[in-house]
Every structure is written in structure tokens, then in C-alpha cells.
Image (cartoon, rainbow, N blue to C red):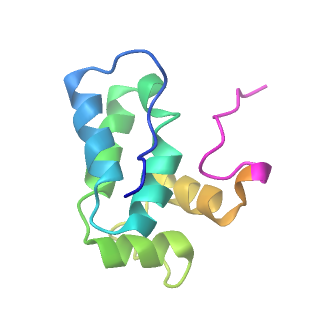
Amino acid sequence: MHTAPTASSAPLDPRRKRILFRATHRGTHENDLMIGGWLAPRLAGMAETELDAIEAMLEPPDPDLADWLSGRRPIPPDHDSALLRQMRAAVATPPAQGGPTDEPTEAA
């Protein structure tokens, strides 16, 4: 059994808790780590519109998300979003270099 990534120590509202649960209990360990690992440190600071985008991004089946995030297949136009591209870029970068388990960085 794996330990799912967690958000910051601040309590999350029910919507964010639901999103974090969905992101870390996808059905495949690979997606739990890719999606949950990217989302957990960012979730508390996300705006409502970003939460809407995350919820939409979580709808496709696990095999499709895994293929798109890993780069095995391109993201199809009907699912392409800035959020999914950000996640794919972070997943492709090792954690020590800004990958999915790193804390978000502040924009200068």
C-alpha cells in the first residue's frame, strides 16, 4: 500500500478534499503518483476556476490520462488544456528538478 500525497497542513474545504481523494485514488498507482503528486502541494491555493479545470481533467479514464501525462500519446484536442500541459511538463521532470512532488514556486 502506498501513502498518498497530502496537501499542506491547512485544512481543506470539502470540495478540495474530494478532488484530492479523486486525484490520489485513480485506480492505478502510476496515476495516483503523477496526478496526486502534482496536485497535492498546489490544491489549497487554487482558484475556483482552477478547481473546475481539475475536476474536468479527472474525468477521462486512467489509461488515457497515464498515456497523455507520460507522453506515450499526445493529448487530444478535446481534452487539451493549460492545466494538463503543466502537469505533463512537471511529470516529465525528475522531482529534484521541479517535478510533481516539488512545492510550487512563486512567480517573480
- What residue lies at 42% left-to-right and 73% top-to-bottom? 66
**Label total for image:** 0
Task: Name the residue nearer the viewer: 69 or 77.
Answer: 69
- Which percent across, then down, holds residue 25? 28, 54
- Which percent across, then down, holds residue 39? 46, 43
Inspect this view and state whether residue 84 appears.
yes
Side of 98 relative to 3 (left or right): right
Task: Name the residue nearer the viewer: 77 or 54.
Answer: 54
Quadrant including the N terminus = bottom left
- What residue lies at 51% left-to-right and 33% top-to-bottom? 42
Compared to residue 19, the image places residue 94 above or below, namely below
Magenta segment, prevailing SS (helix, strand or loop): loop
Compared to residue 32, the image places residue 65 above or below, namely below
Task: Name the residue nearer the viewer: 25 or 79.
Answer: 25
- What residue lies at 45% left-to-right and 79% top-to-bottom? 67
Quadrant including the C terminus = top right
Q: Is 102 one of the magenta-colored residues?
A: yes
- What residue lies at 35% left-to-right and 16% top-to-bottom? 11
- Which percent across, then down, holds residue 95? 70, 53
Inspect this view and state whether residue 75 appears.
no
Which contiguous range is marked in magenta? 96-108
Side of 15 relative to 103 (left or right): left
